[in-house]
Image (cartoon, rainbow, N blue to C red):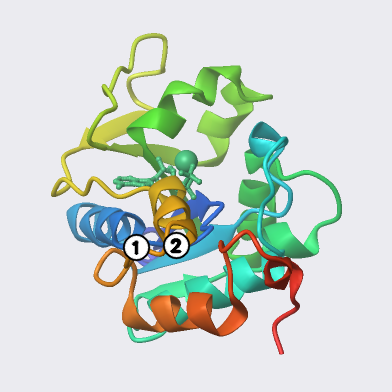
Amino acid sequence: VRTDRMEQTRRRIGVMGGTFDPVHHGHLVAASEAQSVFGLDEVVFVPTGRPWQKEGRDISDPEHRYLMTVIATAANPGFSVSRVDIDRPGKTYTTDTLRDLHAQHPDADLFFITGADALQSILTWLDSDVLFELAHFIGVTRPGHELDTEGLPPDGVTLIEVPAMTISSTDCRRRVAEDKPVWYLVPDGVVQYINKYGLYTGGDDDEDQPR
Ligand code: ATP
Ligand code: MG
């Protein structure tokens, strides 16, 4: 009886990993929809440390990406932000992310939320078989990317439809660099943060530390 009750109280935690450079409404809608469909108690956003798949382009200071993610999620009591990846030295591997979160939440089941494009590359990730033991994977639709689960374990991945958001961080960065607005693509506080630190303008200010 006791274990039954304990089973029922296992928390369900969504994990939304990303570079979040910057975080935008596509991320937030995907997390919100996954939270609703899977009855997640909480969704933890985890900004990457040094994303090894993105080496070659300049990525904003992890503290900027962390703070923008905090600003974007602060008003939602069901959302939080974790520093596990940005505080771990070296490159970010999703297996490390999930192991660290398991250690912090030993009573929780983890659900890793990922867009169609990222899901596609899961099989190329290191230790992909181990990943499916650490979390259930939720693949969300993303405009312009086909959701294809071929080769993925069927019980390890669930695909869900989320309201289409044709927003990418790449596009937001390009828009800022071209002096076009990003209002309503990213949360208001993130627009103001980007302006405050002169992010994505291509100027020297990009390297400024948060103050
Ligand atoms: P970049 O253009 O720099 O790659 P991005 O917009 O793809 O940025 P990431 O930080 O790379 O954002 O993405 C984090 C996670 O969010 C990934 O799993 C990605 O597939 C998902 N995601 C990003 N944008 C969307 C969107 N518009 N709709 C659904 N999922 C998204
Ligand atoms: Mg991306």
| Viewer-closest of 2 and 47 | 47
Residue drawn at x 70%, y 73% as measured from the top left: 205
| Viewer-closest of 160 and 202 | 202
Question: Relative to 5, does residue 18 appear above or below in the rendering?
Answer: above
Tell me where residue 183 sits by quadrant: bottom left
Tell me where residue 153 sits by quadrant: top left
Residue drawn at x 33%, y 81% as measured from the top left: 188
Which amino acid, mark 2? Val
Q: Residues within 10 Å of mark 1 (few under 14, many from 20)?
A: few
In the image, taking residue 195 as reference, residue 59 lies left or right, namely: right
Percent coordinates x, y for residue 65 in the rendering = 59, 66
Which residue appears farthest toward the right when viewing the image? 89
Q: Where does label 1 land, which residue?
A: 180
Percent coordinates x, y for residue 2 in the rendering = 42, 66
Which residue appears farthest toward the top when viewing the image? 151
| Viewer-closest of 177 and 120 | 177
**Callout 2: SS:** helix
In the image, taking residue 56 as reference, residue 160 lies left or right, namely: left
| Viewer-closest of 21 and 49 | 21
Q: Where does label 2 land, which residue?
A: 176
